[in-house]
Structure formats: C-alpha cells, structure tokens
Image: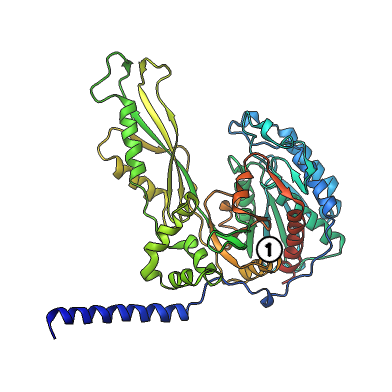
Amino acid sequence: MSWGGKVALTAAGLVLGVAAVVAVRTATFEAPAQADPASVRLAAARPVDVAKAADHLAQAVRFQTISHQDQAEDQPAEWDKLHAWLQTTYPEAHKVMTREVVADHTLVYTWTGSNPALPPIVLMAHQDVVPVTPGSEGQWKHAPFDGVIAEDAVWGRGAIDDKGSLVTLFEALEAVAVGGFRPLRTVIIVSGHDEEVRGVGARAAAALLKSRGVKAQFVLDEGMAVVADHPVTGKPAAIIGTAEKGYATMKVVAPATGGHSSAPPKDGGGVVTLARAVEAIHDHGFPMKFQGPGADMLKAIAPHASPVVKVFAANTWLFAPVLVAVTAKTPAGAAMLHTTIAPTMLKGSPKENVLPQDATAWINYRIAPGDTSATVMARAKSAVGGLPVELSWSKTPDEPSAVSSTSSEAWKVLAGLAGDESEAPVVPGLVTAGTDSRYMGGVASDVYRFQPLVLKVDETKIIHGTNEHLSLANVERMVRFYQRLVETAASR
C-alpha cells in the first residue's frame, strides 16, 4: 500500500472512531437536572379567586414605591402606605406570622413551624419599582401607576417586577392561613425595599437571619420564569436560575493638564487617552466558554430539542465551539457564557472649548461564576498597559453567586412543582441581572431564582419597559404555585 493510501486509511479510521464515540455518547446521554413531579408528593391546589387577586395587585401598583438613583427623590410615605395596606388586606397571614422591619422599610416575616429542628424556607419578593422613562408616559396604554385591569391583565409599573410576586405570594399565604395550614418547617418571607438600586434592605435582612443562625433549606427569589417559546426548542421551558452574575462598575480616570482647546497637546489630552483605555479594556474581553449554568441549561433541554442539539450536547468535548457560536448569536445568549463588559458613562470637560483636567469613564461588569472582581481588575490593568489611567471600583463589587444544586431535595420540590404547573421541561439557568437573593448565600447553600409566570421571549422587554402588565392567567398561576410550594416544602 502506498504512503498516501496508508494516510487515507488512518484518517478514515480516525473519523470512524470519532463517529463511534459520538454515537455512543449520544445514545447514553442523560440530561442533568431533569424534574420528575411524580417523585415529589406535591400539595393539592386550592381554588384561586383570580378577580380578587388581580384587584389586590392593581391596588399595590398604585403605591409609587419608586427607587430612584438619587435616594433623595424617593417617597418613604409610599412604602409606609404599602405596609399598612398589606396588613389590612392580608389579616390572617399577619395573624400567623411575626413581622419585623429592618433598614427602614424592608420586611421580614416569620411563620414559625412546629419542628424548629428543620431548616426553614425563605421566600423573597421586593417592594420597589423602577421609574418610568421620562417622556414615555404617553406610550402606555394605561397610566403606569393607575393599576388598571383591562384586556385580561393588570397594567402598571411593577405588575411583574416585582409586586406581582409580592401580592401573589401574600394571596397564597392568606389562603393557606385561612385554610388552617400549620407548617412543620418555618417559613420566612423577606421583602426588600430597594432591590432596584441599592439592596441595603436585603443585606440587612440577610445579616439579621445570619445573626440568628438561620441555615435555610433553600431561598427562592425572582430571576427566571417559564419561557413560552424557548429559543432552542420553540416550546415552553421552565428555567430556574441556579446562580446569578456578580455586579461591579469600574471607574477609569485619565488625568490631564487641561487648558484651552485651541492649543491641544500632541497626545490629544485626557479624552483621547481615556478613549484608548476604554477601547482596550472592551476589546480585551473575557472569552466565551461552554460551561456553568448557561451550558447546563442547554444540556438539560437537549432531550426536548432536535436530534442535532442532543448530539452536540452529548459531545461537548467535540462540539463546544459550535455550541458557543450558536448560543452567542444573540447578546442575551452570549451573556450566559462569559463576563460582560459594558462602558456606560463618560465625563470630560464642562465646556466645549476647554480641555478637561481629567476624563472619566464608568464600565459596568456582570461577572460570570468562575470569575471574580479581582480577575476582572487584573484583566483591565493588563489591557490598558502603559496608558496613564487610574482604575478603581466605584463601590465594592458584588461577586457572582455560588451555583446551587440541581440534585438536592430543595431542587426536587421546586423543579417538580414548576414542571407540574407548567407541563414543561425544567432546566437550570444563569441570571445575568441582579436580585436581592445575592445576599443570601450565607443563609442557604441553595438559592434559586424563579417566578412562576409564563412569558414569550419578546414579552420580557416589558419588564422595566413600557406597558408592563401581568396577565390574569399568570396571576392565577403564581398564586397557585406559591400556595402549593408553601404547603409542600413546609410540610416535609
């Protein structure tokens, strides 16, 4: 046989060997984190008075608990009114729970279980909302703080984020209290008042629980939902966030001598130096990797996708680059696979014909699990090299959370219930934004992020956007989910 023939034969053998490995791994592939509702004894659903729950949510929307970037613009009286309304609207829930207020307006409720040896569960929903974008008020179908019920939905700022969760959670608590339920396991409710800007309240609540030695079975907060048209399958999928990214903003300062713009320095001055530094940091980004919760989501949903997706998911050793390329086709997909870098704010001279004495930029990072603020800073310093700029954090960074279990008893309860309610596959995911639950790592090892509502991908833009609304069908789903969750988890 000629040398060329031997090479061809060897190559053919390698191809066949790789194909055999791919086939075997695909045939034996077991997707992680598969939920089996039948494996958990789930509490039965109680009847839901949807009209009443919707009316209560509409009332809650009318309290303008707006967290502004400038705290001086907040209206503390609105939080006071909301607190009084909660006590009046849900009297039976307040009878069975003790109520505490920390950091001025954050609420901590405790429904003591009959077995104090069991780790409690912690359920979270924040009270504050983001402002309405100035000038967009006329684009709303219904005024953002009128709390209108129309077109089979409750309209207004916070209807989804996060008064929808707060109200439906209390609807559930009221229902189970009226029904005579008594928990075996203690139930703790934490409702932060400033999640959208500072998270001071959630930090204070976490510190309170830690001081009491609370080690919860799990924490559940907002973060993910049931996606009606998952990009991979085009079908519903319930995504439970098992981790969230860290948050940090870097301040980049380019000192300069200043002066008159008619005689600029040869190097262009502080603005040019700053521009070069920001570009260098941005271009020296973090590589995308098919690992962590973002990758786990695709692996878990693979059995419900096309055969090609299953082949790729079962053989990441070979197809990881392809999976990364496909996932990264959208900014949201790319954000699941690496630490992101987003220059957001700039400051230079106060006048157009004056050279600034310093130019400043702010760069917002969302830090993926596996990275830290220290590795981010080191990478930025390496990127700017010898450029005369100063790098610092605008405030202490929030590190990425730990990754919660997808095999624990807590996961089995949450995923089992989410699957039973949604009749959709349940998969883990990475929350790329921030929630109050990021402060609860010392309270529980398993911190999950999930709202039991169904939204299409395109509908998620109304969160923090114009025409935010929660459908009556979702109101019913959420009340029922929280009711069943409390009665299931607190009875085990």
Location of residue 456 (image quadrant): bottom right
Relative placement, left or right, of 110 versus 306 is right
Q: Nearer the viewer, residue 374 or 429?
A: 429
Q: Residues within 10 Å of mark 1 (few under 14, many from 20)?
A: many
**Residue at x 64%, y 51% (from the top left corner):** 208
Location of residue 361 (image quadrant): top left
Mark 1, residue position: 120
Relative placement, left or right, of 42 versus 384 is right
Q: Is residue 145 above or below residue 478?
A: above
Relative placement, left or right, of 278 versus 54 is left
**Residue at x 64%, y 55% (from the top left corner):** 221
Quarter of the N terminus within the rendering: bottom left
- Image position, residue 162 (x, y; %): 68, 47
- Image position, residue 133 (x, y; %): 62, 33
Q: Nearer the viewer, residue 206 or 11?
A: 11
Residue type at tag 1 = Pro
Residue at the extreme left: 2
- Image position, residue 320 (x, y; %): 39, 65
The reply to whether residue 250 is visible in this rendering is yes
- Image position, residue 207 (x, y; %): 61, 50
Q: Is residue 407 above or below residue 287?
A: below
Q: Nearer the viewer, residue 190 or 358?
A: 358
**Residue at x 22%, y 81% (from the top left corner):** 10
Q: Is residue 61 above or below residue 164?
A: above
Q: How is the image coloured?
A: rainbow
Secondary-structure class at tag 1: loop
User: How many labels sit on residues?
Assistant: 1
Quarter of the C terminus within the rendering: bottom right
